[in-house]
Image (cartoon, coloured by chain):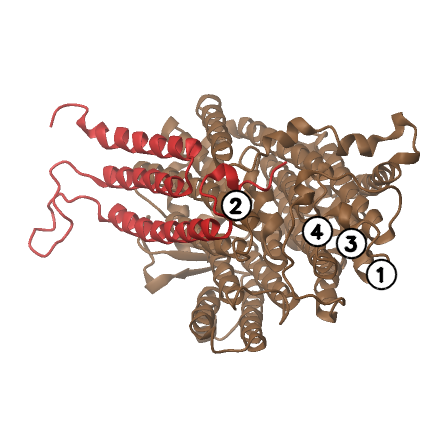
Chain colours: A red, B brown
């Protein structure tokens, strides 16, 4: 592995975080906004997996490898899976809200939705 | 108090299991059960939860209860399992959540629109989320509970899907709080990378005296994430939009406990992890946090006075009071923590009472707009009395527990040479109580000239109850109980001593560590409350109440006053530049959040090294 390669997951995570953030800030479509939130979320997946990665480590299943062998950290993988589940719920709920908003008022741009201000 | 072991072992899981199981049952049967039965069952679950939390609080009085799920206790210094750490503070918070949920369900009994019986199961899931969040001793577990309670809260906000405003409120709420949750998660991931631990006690142990930039950055991210929930400027924008449109019982829980839970999490993590980590820089940390606290308190108070939509006005007052709690929290130390907790507790009851009365107004007159309500409620004596009492509570009038919180915080502030803190309490109490009094004078007495209107006041709110021109007894009982609690707390024997010793146990890191690792509660020196200077806070509270009334009068009678006397009208009208920031657009809110994170991150990394 070339030097500084171990920084790559963190760079990717940061990149995804800011992509998602930029998307939410400039969004002109509610579904687009929700998807950007999901993109932002993927940055935490990459970050968690990057933190748990061990150079030359194998999958943390000790059925056919000796206990002393280097494995990647299973804890962060469990965290990431929990994170995926949590996020699926949030995205589903938000998409349901978007559908409702479109049904009731026909607006799909966050700008049109803002009846409350000031 | 000691319980038989087989009962005591089951108690800690019940505040979660009971509401969640009942919620699942109710959600499955919701189209088959009648409304009254649904409400009855939900209230039964909440009542059992209240009893259980009260038992937990009493049994945690002597010894902190540490509950390891699946008995996966610590091995050496490594923690394997997930734990609930139940000390008087966390048990007390779950008790507060359960009590408010019970009152909110009681208020809405057979009456408030439940969105096709969706309200009750969602309220119970929300309760379970909040309870788990306050009890857990594991950082990632905390994030999961945070998301659970947030998701239930988003759904509750968007319950009235008949119009765009609730959907806008729910959407903004969901996006900002989810972004906040990701910040928390990123911070947790960094802490895990540094320490290899997720248990709060283990992280605290590993990070003592260690503040490299990565730890500080993680601390900033976690702080910002929880500040989003706590509506601290500039992370506060979602709160007003969400509160103005949620059903009344939901608002009670939002303002009463959910927002404050964000601050509780910050306090818990700071006491165990970050304050010991930054050690000699704790004073700098105090200055950084107090800037955010004062900004929040003042901005919230100014916006509160400028609003003319009753629920939105109360929402901004919640922001202001969250700022006061942050001020208390940032002073650090047992006494300030006690001030924070006392203020949290009393504010919860006062604000719940005010939201209940606003729900009664919405129910009777089908609007929450101050100009439309003008002079309408002249014959409503009990709601009027409760409303004005609530206003006094916000100002910290003597005999309200808010005053005690103010006194404790001001005393702690004097010890660190920040005497001016009590004036922040005075100003925030003055403006928020003034706004409440102004609405009261207009609505219940019909005094003065017609209220000023604005765009937010014109947003129609679909009432959350069927047309009916009278109030039921239980709608009045809920706010009356809340006001009684806010006053009764100060009359409770040993209230101050109990709060101080609970706060001390929360504050002292070694106490928390020994509870988690060795399951022993080390005896801490009980701080004595004898030299607590209450008199000046009581005077400040009384002055704030009086000035608030005068301010409200200058607003109400602005037509008959000389131009230079119209202080109230001045505060209501020309704050356009502040209101213009509150655009209602999610892009702007997230931009402000990003700026907030950048400022806080830079301050932490550069100033605390």
Task: In this rendered view, identify the residue nearer to me: B593 or B267.
Answer: B593
Asked if residue B396 can be seen in this view, the reply is no
> Where residue B551 sits in the image (x, y, percent)?
84, 37
Query: What label does residue B459 carry, if any?
Result: none
Co-location on one chain, circles 2 and 3: yes
Tag 3, which chain? B
Residue at image coords 68%, 40%: B409
The residue under the point 35% across, 38% down is: A40
User: What is the distance, in whole Å, between disc 2 and disc 3 at their CAs?
Assistant: 29 Å
Q: Label 4: how many residues lie within 10 Å, few (<14), some (14-19) or many (20+)?
A: many
| Residue at mark 1 shares a chain with residue at mark 4 | yes
Q: Which residue is mark 1?
A: B381
The answer to whether dots 2 and 1 both sit on one chain is: yes
**Which residue is denoted by mark 2 in the rendering?**
B168
Question: SS class of the residue under badge 3?
Answer: helix
Of mark 4 and mark 2, the one earlier in the sequence is 2
Q: Dot 1, how many residues are within 10 Å of its Cα: few (below 14), some (14-19), or many (20+)?
A: few
Q: Quadrant of residue B52?
A: bottom right
Distance from disc 3 to disc 1, alpha carbons, whole Å, reads 10 Å
């Amino acid at each position: 592995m070339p030097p500084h390669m171990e920084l790559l997951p963190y760079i990717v995570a940061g990149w995804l975080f800011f992509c998602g953030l930029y998307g939410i800030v400039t969004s002109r479509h509610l579904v687009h906004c929700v998807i950007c939130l999901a993109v932002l979320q993927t940055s935490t997946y990459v970050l968690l997996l990057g933190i748990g990665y061990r150079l030359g480590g194998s999958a943390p299943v000790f059925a056919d490898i000796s206990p002393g062998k280097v494995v990647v950290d299973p804890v962060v993988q469990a965290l990431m899976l929990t994170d995926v589940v949590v996020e699926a719920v949030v995205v589903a709920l938000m998409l349901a809200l978007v559908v409702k908003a479109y049904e009731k008022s026909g607006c799909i741009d966050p700008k049109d939705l803002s009846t409350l201000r000031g | 108090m000691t319980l038989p072991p087989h009962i005591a072992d089951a108690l800690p899981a019940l505040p979660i299991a009971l509401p969640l199981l009942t919620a699942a049952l109710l959600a499955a049967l919701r189209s088959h059960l009648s409304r009254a039965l649904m409400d009855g069952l939900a209230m039964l679950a909440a009542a059992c939860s209240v009893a259980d939390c009260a038992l937990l609080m009493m049994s945690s009085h002597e010894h902190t209860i540490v509950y390891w799920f699946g008995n996966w206790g610590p091995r050496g210094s490594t923690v394997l399992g997930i734990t609930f750490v139940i000390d008087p503070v966390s048990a007390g918070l779950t008790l507060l959540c359960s009590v408010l949920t019970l009152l909110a369900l009681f208020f809405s009994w057979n009456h408030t629109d439940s969105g096709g019986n969706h309200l009750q199961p969602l309220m119970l899931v929300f309760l379970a989320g909040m309870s788990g969040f306050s009890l857990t001793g594991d950082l990632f577990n905390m994030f999961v509970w945070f998301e659970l309670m947030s998701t239930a809260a988003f759904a509750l906000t968007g319950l009235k899907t008949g119009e765009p405003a609730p959907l806008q409120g729910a959407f903004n709420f969901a996006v900002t709080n989810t972004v906040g949750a990701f910040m928390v998660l990123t911070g947790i991931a960094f802490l895990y990378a540094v320490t290899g631990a997720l248990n709060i006690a283990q992280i605290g142990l590993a990070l003592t005296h260690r503040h490299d930039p990565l730890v500080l950055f993680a601390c900033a991210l976690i702080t910002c994430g929880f500040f989003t929930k706590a509506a601290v400027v500039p992370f506060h924008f979602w709160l007003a939009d969400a509160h103005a449109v949620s059903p009344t019982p939901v608002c009670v829980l939002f303002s009463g406990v959910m927002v404050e839970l964000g601050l509780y999490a910050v306090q818990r993590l700071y006491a165990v992890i970050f304050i010991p980590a930054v050690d000699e820089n704790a004073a700098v940390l105090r200055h950084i946090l107090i800037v955010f606290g004062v900004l929040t308190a003042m901005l919230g108070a100014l916006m509160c006075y400028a609003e003319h939509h009753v629920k939105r006005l109360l929402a901004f007052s919640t922001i202001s009071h969250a700022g006061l709690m942050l001020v208390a929290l940032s002073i650090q130390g047992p006494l300030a923590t006690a001030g924070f907790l006392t203020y949290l507790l009393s504010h919860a009851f006062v604000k719940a009472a005010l939201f209940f009365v606003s729900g009664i107004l919405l129910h009777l007159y089908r609007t929450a707009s101050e100009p439309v309500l003008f002079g309408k409620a002249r014959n409503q004596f009990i709601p009027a009395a409760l409303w004005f009492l609530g206003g006094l509570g916000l100002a910290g009038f003597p005999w309200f527990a808010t005053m005690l919180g103010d006194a404790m915080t001001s005393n702690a502030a004097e010890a660190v040479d920040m005497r001016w803190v009590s004036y922040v309490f005075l100003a925030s109490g003055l403006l928020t109580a003034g706004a409440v009094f102004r609405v009261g004078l207009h609505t219940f007495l019909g005094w003065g000239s017609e209220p000023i209107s604005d765009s937010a006041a014109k947003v129609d709110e679909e009432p959350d109850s069927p047309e009916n021109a009278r109030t039921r007894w239980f709608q009045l009982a809920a706010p009356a109980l809340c006001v009684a609690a806010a006053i009764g707390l100060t009359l409770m024997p040993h209230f101050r001593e109990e709060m101080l010793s609970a706060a001390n146990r929360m504050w002292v890191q070694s106490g928390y560590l020994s509870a988690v690792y060795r399951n022993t509660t080390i005896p801490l020196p009980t701080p004595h409350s004898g030299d607590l200077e209450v008199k000046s806070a009581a005077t400040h509270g009384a002055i704030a109440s009086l000035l608030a009334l005068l301010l409200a009068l200058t607003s109400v009678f602005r037509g008959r006053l000389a131009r230079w006397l119209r202080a109230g009208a001045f505060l209501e009208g020309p704050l356009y530049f502040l209101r213009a920031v509150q655009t209602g657009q999610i892009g702007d809110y997230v931009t402000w959040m990003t700026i907030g994170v950048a400022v806080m991150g830079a301050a932490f990394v550069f100033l605390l090294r």
